[in-house]
Image (tube, rainbow, N blue to C red):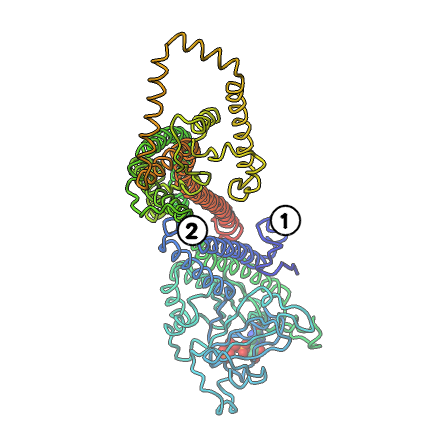
Amino acid sequence: MHTLPASGDSTHRGLHSLKNARKALDNEPLLRFREAKKVLGDVYGELKDNVAELEAVYGEIKDEKIVASEQRQEVEAIRDSIKTIMDTFQRDNMKVVFFGRTSNGKSTTINAMLHEKVLPQGMGHTTCCFLQVQGCDEEKGYLQLDDNEDKKLEMEMLSKIGDALSNENEDLPAMGQDSLLKIFHPKQTETGENRLLQNDVVILDSPGVDLSPEFDGWIDKHCLDADVFVLVSNAESTLTQAEKNFFLRVSKKLSKPNVFILNNRWDASAADMDNIESVKKQHLTRFRQFLVDELEVCNEREVNDRIFFVSAREVLEARLKARGIITRNYQADGHGTRALEFQNFERHFEQCISKSAIHTKFEAHNRRAHEMIGKMRTNLNTVLTSAAEQRTNLQNTLNENTRLFNECRVNFSTFEKAYREQTERLRAEVHLKVSADFFEEIARLDAIIDRFEEPFDGSSAGMTKYKQDLAVFVDKCLSSDLEARCTGGLMSRIWNLENDMFQYVTKILAEPYQNKLEEVWRYRAPFKFSICVDVPALVNDFHEDLEFRFTFGLHAMIRRIIAYRSGQPVTAINANLLTPLSLQKKNAENVVRDENMAAAAEEQAMMTQMVLTSAAFLANGSLGVLVVGGIVYKAVGWRVIAIGGAAYGGLYAWERMRWNSSAKEQHLKEQFRSHLAARMQHVAAAHTTHCETQAIREMDQVFDGLRATVGGVHREMKADLDEQKTVIDGVDSVIRTLGTIKGKAVFLLRNLEQFASSYLRSDSPSSP
Ligand SMILES: Nc1nc2c(ncn2[C@@H]2O[C@H](COP(=O)(O)OP(=O)(O)OP(=O)(O)O)[C@@H](O)[C@H]2O)c(=O)[nH]1
């Protein structure tokens, strides 16, 4: 017995096993069915895996543009069809139906073919319903009623249920003639393997056709899937009309059924040696006529392999004896020839049933598999086309976005360069404007100071407070004036510049990102210069000089010279210049406040000393004075000297007369203005730089804000690009996977073609 791997065994998938075993299998037609079943089962198994893989791939693709619901549903439908076919596939078998009149020996023939007494037989026994024998993997056989598949009955019940004459079957379920009782007989028994059952052959025994049969019902219920019909006739009589009628109905319902005719009980004719050949000839003529002309199921050449003269009883008993079940067997003359004829029948029967079953069962499955693979390929092609289109779209979008991204980066660096140039230009403008405003404001100082109307108090404390208040007042006026001038003059310029920057950056950003910029821009406060002149600090070293001092007096002159030489306001020069330095140091608290001022005081003292020394030199050198006086006297005459002296004295008297409180206030204000103006000129450069810094800082802030936003946008764009690349990679991988599945489908198609040529083509060994 040849053993084949069980159907669905993946390690033996493919057709190669077939080729290797081809020769052996040609002699074992029943194995061909199993092998074909296995090969096609493997194809279906692979198709199922393929569809499952495809379904999983579709499941992962969320994009409806690639896989439309129509394609998904189609794959699900293919998956369900495969499952249904595979389920029926497992049940596919080779079916033979035995017909004939009562007691012609159908049961005996079946038992002989099974090498075992499976069905009850005997003269006293009449089969009353359809009995179907099929193999089971269990060790012990059992019965099953067709309409109650869940219930297993004991094998011992068989003779009671199947026997119409039994008295004990009254309490058993009523079995109509067309009802079916399934007999599951172990494929493997203690005495060996049952070849037919092992190879998926199902045998159906029928009630006698002479028992008022309902042919149509029988055929519809039990015979539509039959591969072979065996008519067991009695060699001692001829074919009855009932037998003929049955097969005429069969050949009407099934196109070209495979019919074998067994002339059973041929042993009974053995005694009549003289007539045997003429009887056989007579039978043959009738049967040929019936098969070829009436039924038209075979031609003259084939019919010889369809009619056999046998003795089922002899064969059965011989086989039972061979297995040691009985000790004596029935044999009549010529039993050897009949035994050979029976074997001949079995060989032809096996070839016929195998070929027929392969065709009827697997041709349809093969065609369905073709259709499903075709559908799957069309489905795959649709999805592949959509995927390719989607990929092109994605790639175009990616290219466009990459171009926008690069363009945006280049534009921003161009913008940055332009921004640097603009800021430098703005710096120059701020410099010009602020310094001009500042100097204008210095020029307007007397007007500001004149607006200060606090009553003037000449006392020392009153003076200090007056000066402090004046400083605060001027500071306030100056700061607000300068702020208003500078901001007013530059605000629109700065705002325009900022707006231009915003507009430019808006333009270089792609549309979806523009609103981000607007959000940043919307909450920006307008620019304003913050100006702090700090007048109190500037007039910190201011020392008013309200002593009456004649304009052309020595003291005033020295101070003016020192102020001129040191580049400081005259009011910053100590009033007590002629007081010795050692004495001044005792009042150091008031005069020298810090190291700088100490250094200034020391410098002033040195200058005073120098001027005084020069004056003393002139005064003390009497000879020099006399010489100079003489020269002057000689040059201009006494009248001019007298007029000069009178003018000098007159000037002194006039100035002395005008020296009152109001004059002091005016003097103080004038001194304050002049001191402040000089100080402000000193700090003008620092002030301008401070304003420039503010303007530049403002611009930098705006630029930084824009850069941060653009940077964020760039990061976002980059992330988008990366994501798009990932999506494209995903689509690529889908296309690759689908390509692989498509390749597998093509391979499966080839397998199906090969299957068809090996099993289904008319010139294949299995073809009928
Ligand atoms: N001499 C002889 N007797 C046979 C032969 N075949 C069957 N018989 C006998 O005929 C009788 C009836 O055989 P079955 O096999 O029960 O006949 P059946 O066609 O199954 O009858 P039903 O079950 O009633 O339809 C049995 O006693 C068999 O021993 C044969 O070839 N030669």
Q: Quadrant of ligand 1?
A: bottom right
Report whether the residue tagged 1 is closer than 8 Å to ligand 1. Answer: no
Residue 365, horizontal then vertical, whole percent: 45, 57
Kind of residue indicated by mark 1: Asn
Where 538 falls versus 239 (above or below)? above
Gap in angstroms between the C-alphas marked 2 and 1: 32 Å
Residue that sits furthest to the top in the current view:
634
In the picture of the structure, the residue carrying the numbered disc 2 is 376
**Location of residue 479 in the rendering, given as x and y in whole percent from the top left corner:** 35, 42
Asked whether the viewer can see residue 702, the reply is: yes
Above-or-below relation of 31 to 216: above
The front one of 162 and 145 is 145
Which badge, 2 or 1, comes first in the chain's sequence? Answer: 1
Residue at the spot x=59%, y=76% of the render? 118
Q: Residue at x 59, y 58 (%)?
A: 31
Residue named by callout 1: 20
Question: Disc 2 beta carbon < 8 A from ligand 1?
Answer: no
| Left or right of 547 on screen, residue 594 | right
Up-down: is 504 above or below 181? above
